[in-house]
């Protein structure tokens, strides 16, 4: 594969209440090969909820997956997430070269 070729991938953003729950969810996704990699970042979130502005310390999960695995990944997130209304933001991305090939291979169930 050329170092300049791009593989179409998906980034899924979701937040968890704390590091432990984010790590547990990330491991579930990785064990099921629904994600190639999950990055966990501490964030301060401000948002509307039940008519009021809320502020919470959370962990932002950046889940890297393939377009093919996206439906199964979203189903798993909805099923296993601790939040009543989990954030599920899906971004189309291109992963270049060897990283793109690795990402697709990592989520290939075969």
Image: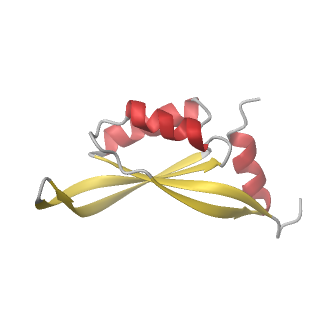
Residue at image position (41%, 40%) is 23
**Residue 27 in sight from this viewpoint:** no
Quadrant of res 43: bottom left
Across and down, in percent, residue 34 comes to 59, 37
* Quadrant that contains the N terminus: bottom right
43 left or right, relative to 64 = left
Q: Is residue 49 above or below residue 32?
A: below
Of residue 7 and residue 26, the one placed in the foreground of this image is: 7
Farthest residue, direction right: 1
Of residue 89 and residue 106, the one placed in the foreground of this image is: 89
Model colouring: secondary structure
Across and down, in percent, residue 53 comes to 13, 63
Q: Is residue 94 above or below residue 77?
A: below
Residue at image position (22%, 56%) is 57
Of residue 12 and residue 23, the one placed in the foreground of this image is: 12
Residue at image position (48%, 33%) is 76
Farthest residue, direction left: 52
Across and down, in percent, residue 89 comes to 45, 56
Q: Is residue 3 above or below residue 71?
A: below
81 left or right, relative to 1 = left
Residue at image position (25%, 63%) is 44
């Amino acid at each position: 594969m050329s170092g300049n070729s791009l593989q179409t991938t998906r980034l899924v953003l979701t937040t968890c209440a704390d590091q432990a729950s984010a790590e547990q969810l990330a491991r579930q996704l990785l064990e099921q090969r629904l994600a190639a990699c999950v990055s966990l970042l501490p964030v301060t979130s401000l948002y509307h909820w039940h008519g009021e502005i809320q502020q919470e310390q959370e962990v932002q999960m950046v889940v890297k997956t393939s377009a093919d695995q996206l439906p199964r990944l979203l189903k798993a997130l909805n099923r296993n997430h601790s939040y009543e209304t989990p954030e599920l933001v899906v971004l189309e991305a291109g992963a270049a070269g060897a990283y793109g090939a690795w990402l697709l291979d990592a989520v290939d169930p075969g």
